[in-house]
Amino acid sequence: MDQKQISAYKDKIMNTCGKIILGKEDVILHVLECWLCGGHVLLEDVPGTGKTMLLRAFAAAVGGSFRRIQFTPDLLPSDLTGIQYYNRKSDEFEFRPGPLFASVILADEINRATPRTQSALLEAMEEKQITADGITRKLPEPFMVMATQNPLESYGTFALPEAQTDRFFMRLKMGYMNRSQEMEVMRRTPARTLIEELQPVVTNEETLEVMRQIKEVFVSDDTAGYMMDLIEATRDPAMPERGISARGTIALYAASQARAALLGRDYVIPEDVQDVAVPVLAHRMSAAASMKESEAWITSILQRVPVPTEKV
């Protein structure tokens, strides 16, 4: 594993996003972990905390094709996947790709679309492909859906089903800036203007290479066993909601590898697992539970499951 390459890759993206979003380095790092693991992000917080700005800045930094989709109740599945249309010049039907045929998709206010439209994302998020009119088409690599939603306002929204939330690699929240950071944002050039000036700082080839290297990060039997202890604790009948599925287990393993690599190590320690456990696992416990409740369940599990002594 080329640690210098990974460190340089991380710094370029963190610095670029940091020009737009202040004081949210850990959130940016989590988004980067999702990107490098081929996962998707659900950013859930109250309006005005910078959710869309962060994801737009990240998309600009990593380059590739980018599409922003404003989800509304009248949005149709074909508006995402594309349609077959009749070309009079060629006298035949042709496929016109929808916005999902891009490297980075910003699904703004995803819970404002109907369940039928939301379900159009399922195949794209899981299989990295889209089937339209009986024909399956591959999506570009890497591919990432970054979705936002407001957890407070329920009028005119449609809650994401559990099958949908389980396909998000992490669920994150922004939170408020501190006083000095917010005063700096208040006085500076508007974020929308700053984003327009951003240029890609990494190439697609660099991204694919770093993705490959992260999979080589070593995970000891003790640390892997610790991950399974956490997963099995969620499946305890005494827990108020369902346990974590195998998809969540795989996500926890991959996220821990990415965390370790981005922090400068070629091996995973229990602290890496703890750092990613809440954003990776909490939303998989229950789609109906509030963010605060589900995070509290995972935190309680982290507090009571014994931490192994790492042997490297």
Image (spheres, grey):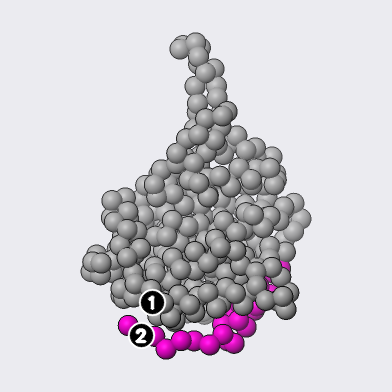
Screen quadrant of the N terminus: bottom left
Indicate whether 105 appears above or below 5: above
Q: Position of residue 264 (x, y in %)?
A: 30, 75
Label annotation for residue 299: none
Q: Which residue is mark 1?
A: 220
Instruction: Please state the extent of the stretch shown in magenta in the rendering.
Output: 289-312
In the picture provided, is 90 more to the left or to the right than 296? left
- The type of residue carrying mark 2 is Lys
Residue drawn where x is 52% and y is 18% of the image = 93
Residue drawn where x is 72% and y is 78% of the image = 238
Question: Is the C-beta separation of discs 2 and 1 under 8 Å?
Answer: yes
Q: Which residue is mark 2?
A: 311
In the picture provided, is 191 more to the left or to the right than 153? left
Indicate whether 190 appears above or below 281: above
> Pointer 2: residues within 10 angstroms few (<14), some, or many (20+)?
few
Determine the secondary structure under disc 2.
Answer: loop
Residue drawn where x is 57% and y is 56% of the image = 167
Choose top left, top right, bottom left or bottom right for residue 140.
top left
Between the C-alphas of marks 2 and 1, the distance is 8 Å
**Nearest the eye: 54 or 247:** 247
Sequence-first disc among 2 and 1: 1
Can residue 89 be seen from the camera position used here?
yes
In the picture provided, is 14 more to the left or to the right than 75? left
Choose top left, top right, bottom left or bottom right for residue 296.
bottom right
**Nearest the eye: 73 or 227:** 227
- The type of residue carrying mark 1 is Ser
